[in-house]
Amino acid sequence: DVTQLRVGLGDRSYDIVIGPGLLAQAGARIAALRPGARVGIVTDRNVAERHLSTVEESLRAAGLVPTPVIVEPGEKSKSFAVLEQVLDGLLAARIERRDLVLALGGGVVGDLAGFAAAALRRGVDFVQVPTSLLAQVDSSVGGKTGINSRHGKNLIGAFHQPILVLADTGVLDTLPLREFRSGYAEVAKYGLIDNAPFFTWLERKWQDVFGGGPARIEAIATSCASKAAVVSRDEKETGDRALLNLGHTFGHALEAGAGFSQRLLHGEAVAIGMAQAFRFSAAQGLCAATDAERVAAHLKAVGLPTRIADIPGELPDTDGLMDLIAQDKKVSRGALTFILARGIGQSFIARDVDPAAVRSFLEAER
Ligand code: NAD
Ligand code: ZN
């Protein structure tokens, strides 16, 4: 019950392995690529408490030399200060050019460790061992790494592809439900972008996906396959990789408006953003209103928010949200780029969206 996929990037191609029990196989699978290597394991405290010893034992048993570098959980760790701590820890562990960095955690750890690996000695190879649903279906694949700045999220970083991704679906059993649900928004996203049958399958099977077992593994594998295909076609986002931003232009503005806090997790913001992208598409006459309703109904069924009113606490007013949308890095020279849809599974890149139309849509949404 292990699925293997490949991201095709010429001599930098790599495998994504998905299934239960992979933490215990990490040593053997990594030793096959880098026998005898030192491995700097970057992880956060939550994940370390539950899963670090399994990985360390597996690495040692395969003749590798692990050293853990443990950071605090949460988005705040994607900072210059924590990056410096991680690099210091890796240097103290004497990780050299032929050694490895291993990211064991959610998207925060993956982005931070990946960037540390890109910078350490001008580039050390790294392995992604994603432990959140979001990291397994999205952030661990594709090579985008980085940290945040006071000027915004993910503004400092590098493209640095992993040499292997090991997604152990069993570790999701310890992930809090709210985090699982947040990651599920990105799973649904792949159906909405270009895979209507997958979305229909999710509408029928989502309870099994949440419950664990074969449906969960299948949903993760289908999502990873979509991401891997897009990344193989368009590594640096000069073309259709931008489709992965469905729901993210509205979503990022809401996340920023909520101060990137626990009030609104990333996937929750994306869920609202996707529902909005479909409602906006329907309002523009691009897609049927029934499709927009179906999208919102499914997200709501799994317990995700679909409207600004679902976010607890205060948010910026419509002009404030418009400013945040304009700051999003997908904006170039005044015109807004959005991912819109002609229907479920029929998303497209709309490069010249009229800001006035977006503003009146947002005003009507509240
Ligand atoms: P996260 O890394 O903060 O993990 C969420 C929480 O779950 C944390 O508290 C973590 O400690 C905990 N956790 C993780 N795995 C666990 C497990 N198995 N058991 C118990 N607890 C566990 O957040 P995330 O949602 O995984 O990732 C969000 C980050 O990913 C953001 O910084 C975002 O910018 C980034 N991201 C990057 C990309 C990319 O392409 N590089 C894509 C999407 C998102
Ligand atoms: Zn996302």
Image: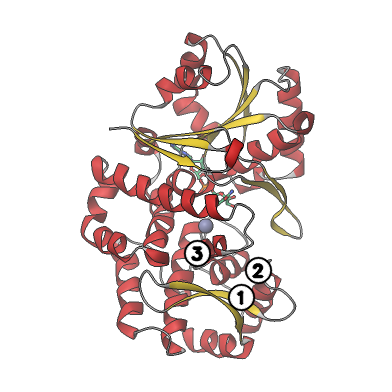
Question: Are the two marked residues, 3 and 2, in contact with CB atoms closer than 8 angstroms?
Answer: no
Q: Residue at x 42, y 81 (%)?
A: 279
Q: In front: 311, or 343?
A: 343
User: Which of the numbered marks, if any, corresponds to residue 145?
Assistant: none
The answer to which image quadrant residue 217 occupies is top left
Q: How many labels does the image show?
A: 3
Q: Is residue 296 visible?
A: yes
Question: Are the two marked residues, 1 and 2, in contact with CB atoms closer than 8 angstroms?
Answer: yes
Circle 1 residues within 10 Å: few <14, some 14–19, many ≥20? many
The answer to which image quadrant residue 328 occupies is bottom right
Q: Which residue is drawn at 45% across and 82% down?
A: 281
* Residue type at tag 3: Ala
Q: Is residue 234 above or below residue 146?
A: below
Indicate which disc, 3 or 1, sits on the residue closer to the N terminus: 3
Residue marked by disc 2: 330
Indicate which disc, 3 or 2, sits on the residue closer to the N terminus: 3
Instruction: Measure the alpha-carbon separation of dots 1 and 2.
Output: 6 Å
* Residue type at tag 2: Lys
The answer to which image quadrant residue 2 occupies is top left
| Ligand 2 neighbours mark 2 (CB distance < 8 Å) | no
x then y, percent, for residue 169? 36, 36
Q: Is residue 272 above or below residue 155?
A: below
- Residue that sits furthest to the left in the current view: 204
Residue marked by disc 1: 337
Quadrant the N terminus occupies: top left
